[in-house]
Image (tube, helix red, strand yellow):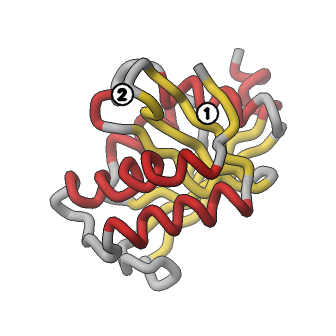
Amino acid sequence: MLSPATPRDAAPLGRILGDWPRQTPWMPVLHSRAEDRRHAADMIARFEVIVARGWRGPCGFIVLDGAAVHALYLARRARGRGIGRLLLDAAKARSARLDLWCFQANTGARRFYAREGFAEVEWSDGAGNDEGLPDVRLTWRAAAMEDAA
């Protein structure tokens, strides 16, 4: 089930957000758990945040600012179950174009976005992100999906 985030979601979304770098060997852990919660609360206050909810509570979320996807994170238990696609489909329903940045080393996410019709359009050396890791900008356009069908 998808629903808009509320301020009460900050703690579970902060946990999901913070778990990913802690579970990813190549990813530096830059923030404390308290900072993760504050960051989630800030995203909820500033952007459109859609939460995927399972029987154990929030299991994933996407953060949107118009056509910009600022974040798409899933709890470990939710990965590989179609929840990421569900969240991305909700974003696609709101915009004819989506843009996001993904770490180049995140090959699983890059394969996922490619399956979802995103094209890699720009690469960086990581100077523009907090982690200092090379990343890639991906773009999706509704028209491109219709032409491919």
Along the line of sight, the residue nearer the viewer: 139 or 100: 100
Q: Residue furthest bottom?
A: 127
Kind of residue sitting beneath label 1:
Leu
Residue 49: horizontal and vertical position, in percent?
A: 66, 46
Residue 26: horizontal and vertical position, in percent?
A: 20, 63
Disc number placed over residue 134 in the picture, else none:
none
Along the line of sight, the residue nearer the viewer: 32 or 123: 32
Residue 23: horizontal and vertical position, in percent?
A: 20, 52
Location of mark 1 (residue): 88
Location of mark 2 (residue): 78
101 on left or right of 23: right
Residue at position x 31%, y 72% from top? Answer: 32
Q: Earlier in the sequence, mark 2 or mark 1?
A: 2
Kind of residue sitting beneath label 2:
Ala
Per the model, the C-alpha gap separating discs 2 and 1 is: 14 Å
Query: Residue 70, located in which quarter of the rendered image?
Result: bottom right
The N terminus appears in which quarter of the rendering? top right
